[in-house]
Amino acid sequence: MEARRLGVLTKVDLRKIWPHEALDFTRWLSNEENIQLLCDELDIELENIKVEEAAGRFNVDIVAEEVVTKRRVIIENQLEITDHKHLGQLLTYAAAHDAGIIVWNVKNYTEEHKQAIDWFNRNMPEGISFFLVQVELWQIADSPPAPKFNVVSQPNNWAKTVKRTGNVDKDLPSELKLLQQKFWSDFREYVNNFIPKTSLNLGRTPRPQHWYDISIGTTKALIALTFNSRQKQLGCELYIRSDGAFYQMLKNDKEKIEAEVGGPLNWMDLPDSTAFRIITYQNFNPTSESGWQSNFEWLKSKAEIFQKTFKRYLVPSYGS
């Protein structure tokens, strides 16, 4: 059997895509779809995102709030190697905004600056957390560059337990994460116990995160269900991995597909992404468990319709 040919990852210079930190990178990052990539790596959810917010005589790149604890978050971007000037700015902005979460996105870092961030995390009060994040861009052949956020320094045990301030026990996972895991666990139980049996494959164990993936038997795409606590929205989407030609083929059939799924869809061919998304949303109240069953019914129904509609394009023999 002939070995399958694989692509080679090539690193892309950040300045080639984002020549100017404030005008290009910060504006790009402030977009909801893009900042979510960073949030996923930091295990937080943000709201009230503002760009170039004043801090005395200076402007901090991005200011936001953490959804559950309402802690102020500041993000300082530096598309070069770390230096003392930006470290000083980071601390100045943190003080000016009384920030509880401080994020420093950089192209590269010195060991001295990493040690400084580590020292802050060891010695600051429990409610203050520092992150040093290395930003990279990668591509395969002529594919669009894909951003990657590598967390270089973070509070001790952050990956295991998202520490919280106020009246929440610091050893407990995030309230939001617990809510997400319960929602997906209850949804999975609802679908698996549904009669007649569904064709959806919900084999994956639910995790404390804002999405739940459903395999549809191909590596080209999957169905993703999403839980947006900030905008109080549920989503059902077809997530297409790095196949612009396939996405365009679907978009050419937009009217037919939207008629089949029962309404208009959001077609997201993001220029800075190597993935494509076709989404529908529904409003919901994440904290009202009494209303979850109707949410489960909507998610199950939409996921089944998406599977039936899109799998015919992905697997030609499906449904024949």
Image (cartoon, grey):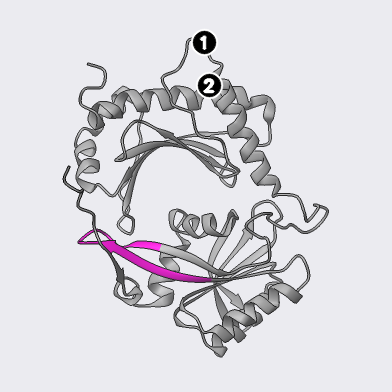
Residue 20 pos. (x, y %): 37, 77
Q: Position of residue 224 (x, y in %)?
A: 44, 38
Q: Nearer the viewer, residue 149 or 89?
A: 149
Q: Is residue 142 left or right of residue 205?
A: left
Looking at the image, which residue is at 53% across and 38% down?
233
Give amino acid for label 2: Val
Does 319 appear above or below 118?
above
Amino acid type for the residue under numbered disc 1:
Ile
Where residue 152 sits in the image (x, y, percent)?
Answer: 54, 70
Depth check: give the residue in front, 223 or 265: 223
In x, y percent, where is residue 91?
65, 81
Check residue 195 in the rendering and tell me which mark sits there, or answer none.
Answer: 1
> Camera-side residue: 238 or 163?
163
User: Which residue reaches farthest top?
Assistant: 196
> Distance between the Cα atoms at labels 2 and 1?
9 Å
Q: Is residue 70 left or right of residue 299?
A: right
Furthest residue in direction right, as rendered: 167
Could you say which quadrant of the image residue 79 lies in? bottom left
Identify the residue shown where x is 64% and y is 82%: 116
| In the image, residue 144 lies in the stretch drawn in magenta | yes
The magenta span reads 133-147
The local secondary structure at tag 1 comes to loop
Q: Quadrant of the C terminus?
A: top left
* Residue located beneath label 2 in the image: 191
Q: Is residue 51 above or below residue 166?
A: below
Quadrant (top left/top right/bottom left/bottom right) for the N terminus: top left
Q: Which image quarter: residue 119?
A: bottom right
